[in-house]
Image (tube, rainbow, N blue to C red):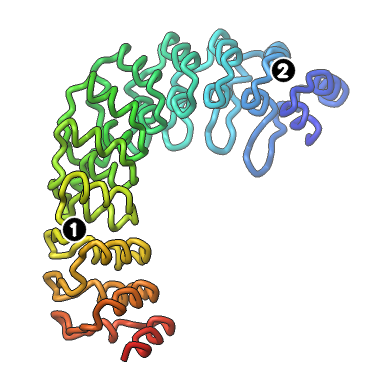
């Protein structure tokens, strides 16, 4: 069995043919598969693009039986060939009657998998053979969303030519293709979408995130600038009352945060709905370099949120010793919060306690 699987993977048609005809006269070879992945001889041949082996196997057992093969992820031969861009294998499988919209685990189709790669020829072939551009996976993503995520502008453009309303598709958590492209820093796709589609630039997902917030979260300066140039609101809030400034700080994106402050005049001490500043969010997540940067550029170390907690409370509660030390170097003020807890009382980690002891 191992020899058969190896031949399928390496494309050794001679070795495969000889092994089958010498040892598997009853076609029992077709039941051989990797016990961990479920990969069979046909699956491997399709994944690695070995067309001669696929032709041979089809002649041996017939295409109808060939298409019964799936691995433990539910991938068919067409899923594998499409995913890895094997144009000739895709063409052969489709000519033999492969289901163009077959579904693997998590509801992915061959078209969706092909959209993860920059292979327009395969995408075009699948669509020409009737692949649905509207089918979605378990998260509500279709191939268009996926192409936007990967930054494949040629595929995005092609799919829009097939269905000009694809841009309106929304995932189960309310995310649009524009959100997806912004989060992953796909500047060319963002420009294309804003040029060819009629997006509400401040469209929010189910958590209140706008594409601009996603650009800030990912630290993608070029995308952030494009969105602002197209009118995106810098002061928009998500459902937790956070703005782009706070999201950039929480994500540790110093360049994005600096861009907002220096290029768009965002106040470094702007509070969120709960009264927390960028310094609060950076301290809570333990982004020491960003905490230092914020304090050097005018963050109010003693500013408190609606629970009367300063950034020191959040750094201590998160057991971030380096952030605690940086803050204490600038201010040792430690007033109790709304529950009567000081920042020092929130320390549990021995390193954090040691830092407080050093400044006592």
Q: Secondary structure at mark 2?
A: helix
Q: Residue furthest right?
A: 22
Residue beneath the point at 20% across and 64% down: 298
Check disc 1 and report the residue beneath it: 268
Question: In the picture shown, does residue 324 fall above or below 66?
Answer: below
Percent position of residue 98, x then y: 53, 15
Residue beneath the point at 63% across and 37% down: 38
Q: Which mark is residue 53?
A: 2
Q: Quarter of the image holding residue 11?
A: top right
Q: Give the side of residue 312 with respect to residue 352, left or right.
A: left
- Residue 136 visible to the viewer: no
Classify mark 2: residues with Cα within 10 Å, few (<14), some (14-19) or many (20+).
many
Closer to viewer: mark 2 or mark 1: 1
Where, quadrant-wise, is the C terminus in this rendering? bottom left
Q: Quarter of the image holding residue 329?
A: bottom left
Percent position of residue 239, x then y: 16, 52
- Residue 258 visible to the viewer: yes
Residue beneath the point at 26% across and 81% down: 343
Q: How many marks?
A: 2
Q: Nearer the viewer, residue 287 or 63?
A: 287
Percent position of residue 305, x then y: 14, 70
Q: Nearer the viewer, residue 229 or 296?
A: 296
Q: Secondary structure at mark 1?
A: loop
The CA span between labels 2 and 1 is: 63 Å
Residue beneath the point at 38% across and 84% down: 355
Q: First in sequence, mark 2 or 1: give its number.
A: 2
Q: CB atoms at circles 2 and 1 under 8 Å apart?
A: no
Q: Give the side of residue 328 with respect to residue 333, left or right.
A: right
């Amino acid at each position: 069995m191992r020899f058969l699987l190896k031949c399928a993977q390496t494309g050794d048609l001679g070795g495969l043919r000889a092994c089958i005809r010498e040892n598997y006269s009853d076609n029992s070879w077709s039941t051989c598969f990797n016990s961990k992945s479920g990969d069979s001889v046909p699956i491997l041949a399709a994944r690695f693009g070995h067309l001669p082996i696929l032709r041979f196997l089809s002649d041996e057992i017939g295409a109808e039986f060939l298409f019964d093969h799936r691995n433990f992820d539910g991938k068919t031969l067409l899923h594998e060939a499409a995913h890895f861009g094997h144009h000739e294998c895709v063409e052969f499988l489709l000519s033999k009657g492969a289901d163009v919209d077959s579904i693997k685990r998590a509801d992915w189709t061959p078209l969706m998998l092909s959209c993860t790669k920059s292979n327009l020829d395969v995408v075009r072939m699948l669509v020409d053979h009737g692949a649905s551009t509207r089918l979605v996976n378990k998260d509500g993503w279709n191939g268009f969303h996926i192409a936007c995520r990967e930054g494949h502008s040629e595929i995005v453009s092609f799919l829009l030519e097939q269905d000009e309303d694809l841009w309106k598709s929304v995932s189960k958590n309310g995310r649009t293709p524009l959100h997806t492209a912004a989060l992953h820093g796909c500047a060319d796709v963002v420009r294309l979408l804003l040029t060819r589609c009629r997006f509400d630039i401040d469209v929010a997902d189910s958590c209140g995130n706008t594409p601009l917030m996603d650009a800030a979260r990912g630290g993608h300066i070029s995308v952030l600038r494009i969105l602002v140039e197209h009118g995106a609101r810098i002061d928009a809030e998500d459902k937790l009352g956070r703005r782009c400034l706070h999201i950039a700080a929480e994500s540790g994106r110093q360049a994005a945060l600096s861009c907002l402050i220096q290029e768009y005049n965002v106040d470094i001490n702007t509070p969120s709905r709960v009264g927390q500043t960028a310094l609060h969010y950076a301290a809570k997540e333990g982004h020491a370099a960003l905490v230092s940067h914020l304090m050097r550029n005018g963050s109010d170390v003693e500013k408190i949120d609606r629970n009367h907690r300063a950034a020191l409370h959040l750094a201590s509660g998160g057991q971030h010793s380096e952030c605690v030390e940086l803050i204490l170097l600038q201010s040792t003020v430690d007033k109790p919060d709304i529950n009567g807890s000081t920042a020092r009382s929130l320390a549990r980690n021995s390193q954090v306690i040691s830092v407080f002891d050093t400044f006592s």
